Amino acid sequence: MKFDTPATTNPIDQLKVVGQPVDRIDGPLKTTGTAPYAYDRHDVVANQAYGYVLGSAIPKGRIISMDLAAAEAAPGVIAIVTAGNAGKLAKGSRNTALLLGGPEIQHYHQAVALIVAGTFEQARAAAHLVRVNTARAQGAYDLAAQKDSAPVAKSTSGGGSAESAVGNFAGAFASAPVQLDATYSTANESHSMMEPHATVAAWDGDQLTVWTSTQMVGSTVDDLARTLGIAKEKVRVVSPYIGGGFGAKLFLRSDALLAALGARAAGRPVKVSLTRALIPNNTVHRSATIQRLRIGATRDGNITAIGHENWSGDQPGGKPEAAAVPVRSLYAGPHRMTANRLAVLDLPEANAMRAPGEAPGMATLEIAMDEMAEKLGMDPIEFRIKNDTQVVPDHPAKPVSQDPQSRVPQEKPNPHPPFSKRQLVECYRVGATRFGWNKRNPRPGQVREGRWLVGIGVASALRNNLLTKSAARVRLDRRGIVTVETDMTDIGTGSYTIIAQTAAEMMGVALDKVVVRLGDSSFPVSCGSGGQWGGNNSTAGVYAACTRLREAVAQKAGFNPNEAVFAGGQVRFGSRSVSLAEAAGDRGLVAEDFIEYGDLDKRFQQATFGAHFVEVGVDAATGETRVRRMLAVCAAGRILNPKTARSQVIGAMTMGVGAALMEHLAVDKRLGYFVNHDLASYEVPVHADIPHQDVIFLDETDPISSPMKAKGIAELGICGVAAAVANAIYNATGVRVRDYPITLDKLLAGLPVAM
Ligand code: MOS
């Protein structure tokens, strides 16, 4: 099904099942500990051996020699895989550094060997007997030091242009009556999902199966086949349950590749989990950024010039974090510039983490807006509302060129497309009332409750809505059960549940008559989970397949498919009705289709919006910040399930608090690695850190986005949160911290002296 005109009324609009806050259908499996995660797959294949990944002890240089003899002779060792004996491996299309290093070493903890043994302990013990003789090379590990030589990139990690320009930014900024020019920084961050990367791999002749933990089954098949140099048809990837990913599991990682290589070398199935201490340096992280914001405005608060420059780091061949991209869509202003620069660093590979671009970009932009409002003497919400825009004010400096081969005259894209729906102002109005914004004292450092300095802050949230093809298959059996199959994943988000709701609504059956099977490459290829596109696109794919199944059912019953009504497990036409079970017959009915999109995402900017409100208390004596209350008001299209959506948003808000106050991979700039590579020293918020969170969804449907009229929610919830916390801390203390995370050492000097 091609979706290229805005949706009209369709069966989803009944909202009998879709839009209801139903419990997760996979909840009982999760709460009883019986959901089969990758490392738990003892059941799928017999005789599993254990692989232990050995990471490089140097960040850059060469392996001169490896002495494997002692390890090979150690108890239980079956095989040792290295780049020297693994055979020819191609680089995957999505990873920048090689997943198995050697002789060249590209980063610390890059895998250099997999030791396979009968038990995990035997493999680990043997790994310590491998002698790796290396020659260390000079590397670059300090973003600030490399910043000035960093060129503007060709494109960002999001694929768009890295720079943009409208009007005359320099001139307009120079002549603006009120100016802000401030530089901010955000930290290197680790996804820190609960389930580590893990895989069981088995070969049956030349056929490989991996039971793994990946957000994107289709691209994992592609990249495993490409790296191993085998046909895609020879690879099956199974990933039905995933204990979080946040972007860390978007692409093939070393556990799956090395498990496959280990199983080939050992001649038996091999399971590999990355240890927690390996994950931050072996896999991917969100790059630190340095960002310069310049805003010029008239005295009455109209932005005339806005410039956002961003520096981030990555391996050679990598792409910059798109932190200076969201500013292109957020506020009005005639003169604008953005630039995303990439410093080449020899730290581990940077890549997407929840709301790549927006999360760090809005963490700084939204402090700058708070600072500018203060300079103007305006309320920070009123300043944002005054500069709201219903069209995209910015556009890339070099528009993506049209196909020169094309003979079809192409319509020139609108450089300032309208938003399909934009309710940012409404988010602020609703939130201000609910949160009690009018109680905020605009003068910082004035509200004291005992030892606590109390403050309130606000920030905008923006995250784009991405459209991507997604397929599904649906079966109706003779018991009237509807079974959905798609390689879509559920990374803890609720995919199982919203897909079941979609199929139930479309086929007119109760939720318990729907079975959902996900995460297997033998099922039709879906959009996968990432970029908050999973909810809208995967359910739209199920909508397309169910539309086909409805046609098949109606045809079987002899009804006009456009007029047949599906309800109560029956299909009705006029006064006649047939049960779905009967229509399915003994052989059942099956239909498959996909959703694909036209150019509605070019004619309209599709995005989700929100406003975050935060109240903090800062201990006047110690500088310790405690978040006291949080509220997110979100406008994100139709909410398919308010319970799972709320859960996504509060999780994202919590992660935003982590970015604001705690999360920081510390770089050893001499030795070139992330020092605090475990969850003892890399801190993330826990329940006790977040006493009260509230989420409001504005009533919204977006017929431009898909037949579901939904968008995404899982990344919107983090965008802007860090800035709302920072702004609340400023309001509480009068100390403006521009360097995340806002740890107490950065506040102490500005606090009143305790008596
Ligand atoms: Mo998301 S960072 O695309 O999993």
Image (cartoon, rainbow, N blue to C red):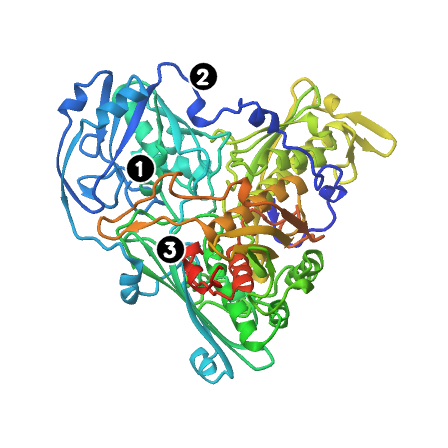
C-alpha separation, residue under disc 3 versus residue under disc 2: 41 Å
Q: State the residue in front, 289 or 521.
A: 289
Residue beneath label 2, please? Answer: 43
Residue beneath label 3, please? Answer: 288
Q: In which quarter of the image is the N terminus?
A: top right
Q: Which of marks 3 and 2 is in front?
A: 3
| Residue found 49% across the figure and 59% down from its top | 755
Q: Nearer the viewer, mark 1 or mark 2?
A: 2
Place residue 457 in its image quadrant.
bottom right
Q: Can residue 581 be seen in this view?
A: yes
Name, please, the residue furthest toward the front: 755
Looking at the rendered structure, which numbered label has been put on residue 280?
none
Q: Is residue 533 visible?
A: no
C-alpha separation, residue under disc 1 versus residue under disc 3: 29 Å
Compared to residue 408, the image places residue 197 above or below, namely above
| Residue found 30% across the figure and 50% down from its top | 667
Residue beneath label 1, please? Answer: 227
Q: Is mark 2 on a helix, strand or loop?
A: loop
Do the CB atoms of the residues marked 3 and 2 lie less than 8 Å apart?
Answer: no
Q: State the residue in front, 663 or 112.
A: 663
Q: State the residue in front, 58 or 212.
A: 58
* Left or right, residue 416 beside residue 579: left
Q: What element carries label 3?
A: loop
* Left or right, residue 391 beside residue 45: right
| Residue found 57% across the figure and 22% down from its top | 32
> Hey, what amino acid is under mark 3?
Ala
Say which label, 3 or 2, has the lower sequence index. 2
> Hey, what amino acid is under mark 1?
Thr
